[in-house]
Image (spheres, grey):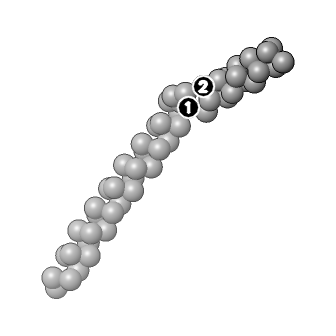
Amino acid sequence: MESCDLTAVITLSNTLTELFSFDPAMFAAVLSGCIVTFISGHVTGKVIRLMSRS
């Protein structure tokens, strides 16, 4: 029974390490998505502001 509990703890530990480890490719994808969203929103806001002036 003791070894079964230890196996479960090790399996849980490995799963959590795999899920929450830093992934540079995922970080780059999320960061680039945030940058593109920010820039497109900023440009859209400027265009709407310019169009409402005229």
Quadrant hosting residue 13: top right
Residue 14 as seen in the image, left or right of residue 42: right
Q: Are marks 1 and 2 in contact (CB under 8 Å)?
A: yes
Q: Nearer the viewer, residue 10 or 40?
A: 10
Question: Residue sitting at 45 percent across and 49 percent down?
Answer: 33
Residue 18 makes an appearance in the image: no
Question: Residue sitting at 23 percent across and 68 percent down?
Answer: 46
Residue 18 as seen in the image, left or right of residue 30: right
Is the residue marked by circle 1 packed among few (<14), some (14-19), or many (20+) residues within 10 Å? Answer: few
Query: At which x and y percent is residue 24?
Result: 50, 30
The amino acid on which the numbered mark 2 sits, given as a three-letter code, is Thr
Query: At which x and y percent is residue 51?
Result: 23, 80
Question: Residue sitting at 21 percent across and 75 percent down?
Answer: 49
Q: What residue does disc 1 label?
A: 20
The amino acid on which the numbered mark 1 sits, given as a three-letter code, is Phe
- In space, the residues marked 1 and 2 are separated at their CA atoms by 5 Å
Question: Residue sitting at 32 percent across and 56 percent down?
Answer: 39
Label 1 secondary element: helix
Query: At which x and y percent is residue 30?
Result: 47, 44
Residue 10 makes an appearance in the image: yes
Residue 3 as seen in the image, left or right of residue 24: right
Q: What residue does disc 2 label?
A: 17
Q: Nearer the viewer, residue 17 or 53?
A: 17
Label 2 secondary element: helix
Residue 7 as seen in the image, left or right of residue 54: right
Residue lying farthest left?
53
Residue lying farthest front?
1
